[in-house]
Image: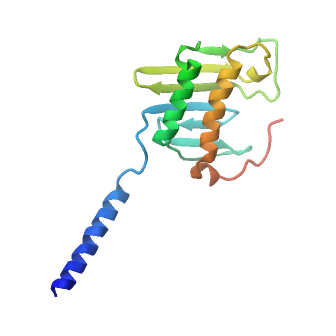
Amino acid sequence: MKLFLTFVGSILMTGCCLFSSSSESSRDVQFVQIFLHTGALDELDTFHGTYQKDLIPGTVKTTMWLTTREQEIIITTLERYGFFSLPDTLYKRPANETLSPDLGKQVLRIRYKDQDKTVVWDDGIELVPHNKFKDVIESITQLIGDIIASKPEFKSLPPVKGAYR
């Protein structure tokens, strides 16, 4: 009987421990908060823990959080490029120029410690050969995009159905 009670007790203790750890939040603390709107409707929003993918047509949304390591990599990159010193507007397309498709304003907002910085640029910055911020913003958004694309939450989303013309 003692052996049986010890066995049952150990199973209950293990079960309680397993239940306790699975009921706790499994996501890392978001010490870096990011809002990144690129393309027409793709958005990472770690302020609210979501990622929206543009399916062209339509969108799909999933939960998305970054690991501590991913956040550290992003902060190191932001600091290397002086993100928090960038101007608020990186590129404004001249009113007489058109782009087709026009994906509109692109936005990157980062909140880290006591810093909260939002930069915007018009779609088409990649076409401007001498914009000194083009390489910086492309490097930062590429890094964040690569991190997003590596996550299981992203990989489980349906593929893009079409293209903008």
Q: Height in image: 152 above or below 120? A: below
Q: Height in image: 115 above or below 25? A: above
Q: Quadrant of the C terminus?
A: top right
Residue 64 x, y percent position in the rendering = 52, 44
Q: Height in image: 27 above or below 110? A: below
For the point 53% across and 34% down, the residue is 73
Residue 8 x, y percent position in the rendering = 24, 79
Q: Height in image: 14 above or below 117? A: below
Quarter location, residue 94? top right
Q: Nearer the viewer, residue 122 or 66?
A: 66
Residue 143 x, y percent position in the rendering = 62, 34
Residue 128 x, y percent position in the rendering = 78, 17
Q: Quadrant of the N terminus?
A: bottom left
Quarter location, residue 18? bottom left
In the image, farthest residue toward the bottom: 1
Q: Nearer the viewer, residue 2 or 93?
A: 2
Q: Nearer the viewer, residue 146 or 123?
A: 146
Q: Is 130 on the left or on the right of 29, as rendered?
A: right
For the point 66% across and 33% down, the residue is 142
